[in-house]
Amino acid sequence: MEKIKITLRPIRNSKIELNENEIEFTPYINTQQRYLLMADFIETLFLDDDVVRNYTVAKNSLILGIIDFVSNIDVSSVSLDMIIGSGLWDRMSKEIKNYESFMAEIAEAVKYYRDSKESFAPMIEKAGALIEKISSVDLSQEGVSDLLKLVDEKINETKIITDPSKAKPRTKKSVVQ
């Protein structure tokens, strides 16, 4: 297949007349904006255990962030309730060409973050327990010597046995564990 060179024109700004205000906005959220908005959304969503508050703040911040990035509106001059209640957000979000795909990206990122957090939780727990145990170790010469013997024993238990005469018989139960 032969490659061709193409020329693309930038997306033209959209305009909305609302309450004698001409609101101009780019009907597209660019890559850098999507990254910043998504990072802020996820950080806020998983801030602490107050799920309802975190979601509400994350969603509201996302709306204000999009409006701030793509429009000529000074978001500090108007409340989110007025933006939504006036119908402005509904009109703008319908005209932003990649809004739906961006929301799907956020949902996918949240799922990925949640899944990765859950898969690392057991390891983090074990690491915490190990650190706690290490902090309670007797650091005298005898305590360190005992610790090294214990570590050596545990390492030897996990080594591959090269002499079959030293191998412990394996039961079905020990293989499953």
Image (tube, rainbow, N blue to C red):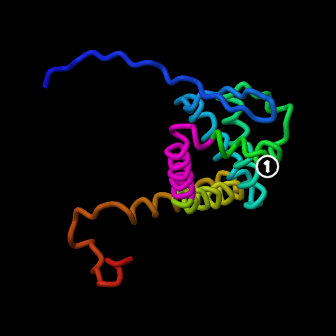
Q: Is residue 163 left or right of residue 134?
A: left
Q: Where does the image place residue 16, in percent across and percent down from the top left? A: 68, 32
In the image shown, does 158 or 21 lie closer to the viewer? 21
Residue 49 lies in quadrant: bottom right
Crowding around mark 1 (Cα neighbors within 10 Å: few <14, some 14 to 19, many 20+) is: few
The answer to whether residue 19 is magenta is no
Which residue shows up at 35% across the image and 15% down it? 7
In the image shown, does 164 or 131 lie closer to the viewer? 131
Which residue is labeled 1 in the image?
85
Say which amino acid is labelled 1.
Answer: Gly
Q: What range of the chain is rendered magenta? A: 93-117
Which residue shows up at 39% across the image and 66% down it? 157
Q: Where does the image place residue 134, in percent across and percent down from the top left? A: 65, 55
Please identify the quadrant where the N terminus is shown: top left
Residue 74 lies in quadrant: top right
In the image shown, does 125 or 155 lie closer to the viewer? 125
Vertical position of residue 100 compared to residue 55: above or below: above
Total tally of numbered discs in the picture: 1
Please identify the quadrant where the C terminus is shown: bottom left
Residue 93 lies in quadrant: top right
